[in-house]
Amino acid sequence: MNEKKLKHLEFIQNVVTRMAGNLFYLRGWVITLIAGMLAIFFGIGSSKLPIIFLILFTVIFWLYDGYFLSLERMYRDLYDKVRLLKEEEIDFSMNINEFKKYKKNSIVFCIFSKTLFFFYVPLLISAIYILLTIK
């Protein structure tokens, strides 16, 4: 493999790694917020407000997580494209617009991917259950 291609692939891989790191940190923040909201809930007593915020934060982070997963998938597609290019075609472009048209890269599709769905849906179901059982 030539030096230009390796450098371009390295640039793209750095972005993919950063996106994957963002996904990891987002999930850590969600768990921290849930623990904090539940502590507030049990400290206040029967107030529904912390649980409502818990649901809101969970949905917001789910959307944000889907956005980062969408970007990560588009950069992975760019990586696959660049690895097949010839040396004279390497232009160090980081443009991912051509990959937005793929269904698998849409934010909605990413939000409902297995990894995000099975992480966020149980959290939402638990929060809604707590909200509905508060008297």
Image: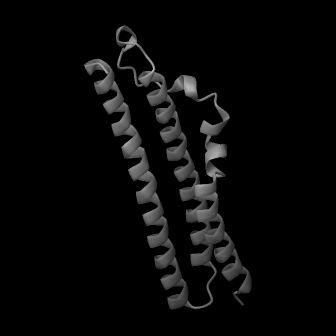
Quadrant housing residue 32? bottom left
Compared with 132, 30 (above or below) is: above
Quadrant housing residue 24? bottom left
Q: Residue at x 52, y 34 (%)?
A: 74
Q: Residue at x 56, y 27 (%)?
A: 99
Residue sitting nearer the eye, 15 or 129: 15
Q: How many marks?
A: 0
Compared with 38, 61 (above or below) is: above
Q: Residue at x 42, y 45 (%)?
A: 19
Q: Position of residue 57 (x, y in %)?
A: 55, 64
Residue sitting nearer the eye, 111 or 11: 11
Quadrant housing residue 29? bottom left
Furthest-top residue in this view: 88
Q: Position of residue 61 (x, y in %)?
A: 53, 58
Compared with 46, 76 (above or below) is: above
In the picture, the quarter occupied by the N terminus is: top left
